[in-house]
Amino acid sequence: MKGFFKSSIGKKTVMSVSGLFLILFLLFHLCMNMAAVFSAEGYNMVCEFLGSNWYAVAGTMVLAAGFLFHIIYAFVLSIQNRKARGNDRYDNQNLPKGVEWSSKNMLVLGIIVLCGLGLHFAQFWAKMMFAELAGCEEAVEGFVATAGYEGRAAVDGAAWIKYYFHNPVILVIYLVWFAALWFHLNHGFWSAFHTLGASNSKWIPRLKCISTVFTTIICLGFAVVAICGALS
Amino acid sequence: MAEHKGLNLTLKVWRQANRQAQGRFVEYKVENISTEASFLEMMDILNEQLINTADPDGPVAFDHDCREGICGMCSLFINGRGHGPDDQITTCQLHMRKFKDGDKITIEPWRSGGFPIIKDLMVDRTAYDKIMQAGGFVSVSTGGVPDANAIPISKIDADEAMDAAACIGCGCCAATCKNGSAMLFVSAKVSQLALLPQGKIEAARRAKAMVAKMDELGFGNCTNTGACELECPKSVSISHIARLNREYIIANIKD
């Protein structure tokens, strides 16, 4: 494996493996969120279970590492690609139909996803898991109380969903975020398998189809949770 | 039989004196070009015109050789597409019947970090030769022409190897790719040998050596846009890129 991670395929392998890991996490996150659609109490039980327990903290650390690898390698590869393309651009380039728009804009889509993630962290993670870990639950509870909510804020995920998604601006921002995530995943999912060599001429169209179905389920699921929160 | 027509065209051509010089577009008018002429014949007519009128820039330099779509020498980015507006053909197979009277045609060289411009529309594609020299061969003596059925090869493998071997190394893949990646070319060369028993023995070494050379020469990373496959004059499939990735990853794991 000497020099593997310095090679172009090695770096793409890191992107693919970390990307697939993050997609798996999204699936887990969606399963957790769907509980909020059916039962606020059930969702809060999940939130409590995944609070500041050691396994949740360990999982978060691994997840953060996955994000970091994915983001760092994305920028490294993009800088190298820009250099490889050279400074001269075509007067015009009319690519034939068949080139996915998302495949040409993965970095921009990734940055949008990252910005959305920052907002999501500030609104939910910082006031729940982080507040528990940092021992500032009382301050968060005070903040929630001013909005007319009662209870243990750090584990009352259902209340936070209701609180934030009742604001139509926040709801629209989240829906735009899910749309960007859809485009990012729709290319990223099949592309990851292709980069890992788990593809051939028969499986490319199949993987693209699976990618679209899977991505739509994930993003639509998150959107449903947000919309249900707004309507609750 | 198609009706012969004479086309009056405006050509917007990239002119660049040498590798270091600043390039620019220059517009030329060509008249009464037959719809039955090939694109390169039209370029020849333009050059005759430039020689006859003692144009200060001289004739336009462009690569060409066999003019029947098999040598991989011709290039040119025509109206925003590698090898022009037609699909699955090289520039030399492009005919003027694809254009209309009064059209303005933009003609550019390959623009990619791996292919520096030598002059006008000619680019230096020796990078591809260097990648081939790194491992795109079978290093043992294979002897004379073997009996057709001496080494059984499945139809699927034979067809896939042949499809990969159709790559003429013109450079359109890297020139089209937004990342300047040469992965389609390298994967075709790795595939055509890895699929056959004579080349399979050295498949791991070959994949590692060719990818290392490709990286060393500064080509970009593949992001699976598929633009290379769509613009490839020989329709080389990106499924070969998946095979190269597989060969390369397995070769490194086995190390």
Image (cartoon, rainbow, N blue to C red):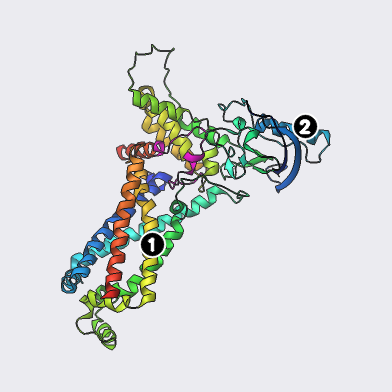
Q: Which residue is pictured at 42% across the width and 55% down the height?
A: A74
Q: Mark number for residue B10? A: none
Question: Which residue in the protein does label 2 denote?
Answer: B48
In this picture, residue A159 sits left or right of residue B33: left
Name the foreground residue: B7 vs B152: B7
Q: Chain of mark 1?
A: A
Residue B141 location (% of width, % of height): 43, 17
Task: Say what amino acid the circle numbered 2 marks.
Answer: Glu
Q: Is residue A112 left or right of residue A130?
A: right
Residue A45 x/y as whole percent:
16, 71
- Residue B140 to residue B204: above or below: above
Q: Quadrant of residue A216?
A: bottom left
Disc 1 element = helix
Residue under pointer 1: A179
Q: Is residue B78 left or right of residue A102?
A: right
What residue lies at 39% left-to-right and 64% top-to-bottom?
A114
Q: Is residue A144 left or right of residue B213?
A: left
**Residue A83, image x, y percentages:** 54, 51
Q: Give me the C-alpha separation between circle 1 and circle 2.
A: 55 Å
Is the residue under label 2 in contact with that under label 1 (CB below 8 Å)?
no
Tell me the magenta residue range. Answer: B218-241
Q: Is residue B222 magenta?
A: yes
Residue type of the residue flagged with mark 1:
Ala
- Foreground residue among B76 and A57: B76
Quadrant containing the C terminus of chain B in the rendered view: top left
Query: x%, y% of residue A140?
Result: 27, 82
> How many numbered markers are drawn?
2
